Image (spheres, rainbow, N blue to C red):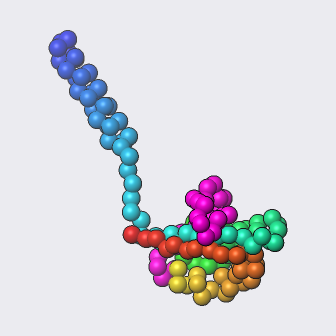
Amino acid sequence: MNQTVRRILICCALIGVFITGAVVGQNKFGQPKSLLHVVTLKWKPESTVEQRQKAIDGVKTMAGQIPGIKNVWLKTVKVQGPSREVQFDAAFVIEFASEEALKVYAAHPAHKKWEEVYLPVREESRTHDIGN
């Protein structure tokens, strides 16, 4: 193989590697069909750290018992605020496979049982259900 052909092949290979890197490195995102149930809440002032943690841990326990729950996020990193009316303390998110799965969750006995732990320590909450 002569020198010119060899250089052309090397250039083509390098161009191929560059194009592959550009395609693979693109920021890709999707619009999943799942539904996010986002809850921000304020704990009752008299609730204990243990009661609060039990309520949050209960979300994970409940998720394992209700069909259609795909993922949960339980660690509050930041809650936007403060608001004039309410300073929220915590947040959690539950991802459902579909809107129908959210309806199953709302009526499920495991959800009702979790509410027995959660509602007595929750002063106020806001819920947002988000999908595509």
Residue 11 is at least partly visible in this image = yes
> Does residue 116 sit above or below 3 in this rendering?
below
The image quadrant where one finds the C terminus is bottom left
**Occupied quadrant, residue 21:** top left
Where's residue 43, x and y in %? 72, 70
> Does residue 104 sit above or below 122 in this rendering?
below
Q: Given the current orientation, which residue lies at the most extreme top position?
A: 3
Secondary structure, magenta segment, majority class:
loop
Q: Given the current orientation, which residue lies at the most extreme front position?
A: 84
Question: In front here: 77 or 110?
Answer: 77
> Does residue 108 sit above or below 22 in this rendering?
below
Membership of 128 in magenta stretch: no
Membership of 97 in magenta stretch: yes
Report the span colored magenta. 74-101
Where's residue 85, x and y in %? 61, 70
Residue shown at the point (76%, 66%) measured from the top left: 53
Q: Describe residue 114's horizontal placement relative to residue 99 as left or right.
A: right
**Occupied quadrant, residue 42:** bottom right
Where's residue 8, x and y in %? 19, 20
The image quadrant where one finds the N terminus is top left
Tally of numbered tags: 0
Residue 72 is at least partly visible in this image = no
Q: Describe residue 54's horizontal placement relative to residue 19 as left or right.
A: right
Residue shown at the point (39%, 63%) measured from the top left: 31
Residue shown at the point (55%, 84%) measured from the top left: 104
Question: In front here: 14 or 110?
Answer: 110
Where's residue 100, x and y in %? 48, 82
